[in-house]
Image (cartoon, grey):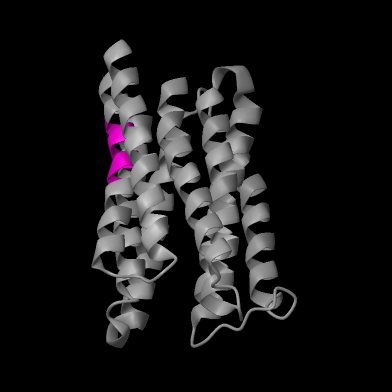
Amino acid sequence: MDLSLILITCTILLGLLSLTAFLFLRVKKTDVKSLMLKSVTSVMFILTGVFLTIAKPSLYSALIVGGLVCGILGDIWLDMKFMYRQDEDFLTKAGFSSFSFGHFFYIAAIIAGVTDFKAVSIPMSLVVGVIAGLVIYFGEKIMKLKYHGNYKIISALYGALLFFVTAMSFNCAFLAGVKDNLHLIAFFVGGVFFIISDIILSGTYFGEGKNRPVDIITNHVTYYIAQFVIASSILFM
């Protein structure tokens, strides 16, 4: 386990360095160099999950890594749309789809990883997800967003899924006993950062004047905190 901790420390430090370099380029423009650095950062959170899975193999850890892999695909496809404007709609939807598949991996991980799964956690979490989806769908003007095409329904469905997964991690841990499910509490913290990141991202995609350097930086910083925390949740199994 000591070697794993050393490797994990290295991946987190390298991830921090590559993220800093990526943001330095990204606030100027999106190009191949920035995309490569972003991919390197994403590889680091995947390696964090892989090294922890080797140290603590379980179905939970394997499914978490599956979700992280979907994350890196979503990263790449979403940024490629800035370089291939003719395929912007396709690449954006591909990114949404990849992250959605990742959240299904996370749902399976939560169910597989909780010490005593309670079925009631599903409807409890579903209520949170539905409310979030309705707020996103009907709160367009309040949030000062302007969706184009069918992104209103896509964003509402994706938001509902994200809130559902985050709520489920907390509800499962709470119902089964927080002390024995600290990995799910860690996942919950990562999920909260994921939500914050996507709220900022929705502004950069569908808002006016919300694509400033501060928006780009806070979006990516909170996103990578989310992914590294989710990957590190395996440590608390």
Observer able to see residue 56: no
Observer able to see residue 69: yes
User: How far across and down, in percent of the image, does residue 184 sit?
Assistant: 53, 31
Q: Nearer the viewer, residue 69 or 20?
A: 20
Q: Residue at x 37, y 33 (%)?
A: 13
Region of the chain picked out in magenta, as a range: 43-50
Q: Nearer the viewer, residue 181 or 221?
A: 221
Q: In the rendered view, does 132 fall on the left or right side of 53?
A: right
Q: Compared to 116, does 68 lie above or below?
A: below
- Specify whether residue 69 is painted magenta: no
Q: Nearer the viewer, residue 237 or 146?
A: 146
Q: Nearer the viewer, residue 165 or 87?
A: 87
User: How far across and down, in percent of the image, does residue 45 sit?
Assistant: 35, 40
Q: Compared to 17, does 131 lie above or below?
A: below
Q: In the rendered view, does 24 fall on the left or right side of 166?
A: left
Count of all numbered marks drawn on residues in the image: 0
Q: In the rendered view, does 105 fall on the left or right side of 149?
A: left
Q: In the picture, which quadrant includes the N terminus?
A: top left
Q: Residue at x 47, y 55 (%)?
A: 220
Q: In the picture, which quadrant includes the C terminus?
A: top left
- Specify whether residue 44 is painted magenta: yes
